[in-house]
Image (cartoon, coloured by chain):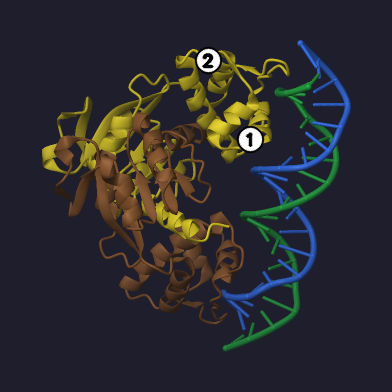
Chain colours: A yellow, B brown, C blue, D green
Amino acid sequence: MNKISEKSVYRLIVYKTLLDKLMEEGREKLFSYELAKMASISPEQVRRDLMAVGYFGSPAHGYNVKELCASIAAFIDPEQRQKVVLIGIGNLGKAILDHFPRQSRKLEIVAIFDNSPEKINRVIQGYRSYHIDKLKDFVVENAVDLAIITVPANAAQQIAGILNNTNLKGILNFSPVQLQLSNSKIFVERVDMMVSLQKTAYWANFNR
Amino acid sequence: MNKISEKSVYRLIVYKTLLDKLMEEGREKLFSYELAKMASISPEQVRRDLMAVGYFGSPAHGYNVKELCASIAAFIDPEQRQKVVLIGIGNLGKAILDHFPRQSRKLEIVAIFDNSPEKINRVIQGYRSYHIDKLKDFVVENAVDLAIITVPANAAQQIAGILNNTNLKGILNFSPVQLQLSNSKIFVERVDMMVSLQKTAYWANFNR
DNA sequence: AGATGTGAATGGGTTCACAGCA
DNA sequence: TGCTGTGAACCCATTCACATCT
């Protein structure tokens, strides 16, 4: 595997999302500048990113949408199906369940967790819910790959402690807390909505 | 104002969030490496970022938490209070209302919008809701600064079109769509939870 | 001694510019 | 002609290394 930057991977996923939609609409080919415009990125950047996936377009006709899509998928999608758990069934957790693509080929939510009695041992939005006490055993026994943390700030580090001693591979952390993990095998991605909002406020006020 | 990078601003906001909590806990001083650890960043990076805000610590005692906090606030917080609207009162919108700091000095949600009859003309989580038809006039008449978009994919571009012709300064876009705006005065920050999840899946599988 | 602030070096990411192709 | 793929140049971000301070 060639080395590739975190940012390129992110953009490839964005391209893939756009291409999926184009494909549905029956689009057959497109040029780098078209994809660039849709993603608000320079055409050179798009071509540079595409070099990594090893699919080549034609100067005359650009890229074949279907083939390009397949090539990017081959590059970014994990080989095996990934088992995902979601922890924290509040509004944010439910929002993610809403957005989660049901027919995703590669990512599957296998269980959801909370500590509130009225939310556990039920089926919520089609997913089976359990108490957090069951989290550790569940992750270990089912070889869960990824966890999405959507619990409030005060509970986040406790969850991290539980997950720290499992074979988990990655965490997507939406809680407003920087998790401290000693297990450096676990990749952690953090998304803090309030930090993003403050960032927006800063740049909106004197952009440039 | 010295030029500063987008990433530095983001980190400064993270520092500020951490320092606020330390201050509440009564912490009085700290060293760069401590802040670095909490933010999972190198100490040099922290010091470099702090150069931009113009607050200087002492080699013997590090930084005074309260003063540093105030300096960062002076640097990143907008001068005026910013009026914010939220568009889309689904689970995601409600999640943001949950997380929104009520006593924020600088950011204030002044109204929320949706197109569903049972969600409008009410008070939801303490915020007044209106139909999207009212959005444009509201933004213009109240000189709204920022908009948070949490509507589904199919409605997002329509909202962007409405906001495009206002004096709005920034948009935080949570919808899974790259908004096309002709008004380049508007700063747009995009957060796509599903792209973040796929990114996590990629790096979790062969991290490094 | 053990921090800080910062010039200099390094490393990565993006854009430029152009050869090559249909 | 008008695109693609890509070396080279440029630019920005991070880290190193060290003079400086208490």
Q: Which corner quadrant holds the C terminus of chain A?
A: bottom right
Say whether residue A18 is left or right of residue A151: right
Q: Residues within 10 Å of mark 2 (few under 14, many from 20)?
A: some
Please name the amino acid that badge 2 sits on.
Answer: Arg
Q: Does A145 sit above or below residue B141? A: above
Say whether residue A35 is left or right of residue B196: right
Label 2 residue SS = loop
Say whether residue B98 is left or right of residue B12: left
Please name the amino acid that badge 1 sits on.
Answer: Ile
Label 1 residue SS = loop
Measured as percent of width and height from the top left, residue B126 is found at 17, 55
Measured as percent of width and height from the top left, residue B147 is found at 37, 49
Q: Quadrant of residue A3?
A: top right
Q: Quadrant of residue A130?
A: top left
Which residue is nearer to you in this view: A59 or B137? B137
Which residue reaches farthest left? A118
- Residue at x-position 49% and y-position 69%: B75
Q: Is residue A154 visible?
A: no
Q: Residues within 10 Å of mark 1 (few under 14, many from 20)?
A: few
What numbered label is drawn on residue A27? 2
Q: Does A141 sit above or below residue A26? A: below
Q: CA distance from mark 1 to mark 2?
A: 28 Å
Which chain is indicated by disc 2? A
Which residue is nearer to you in this view: B149 or B96? B149
Q: Is residue B29 visible?
A: yes
Q: Which residue is identified by label 1?
A: A4
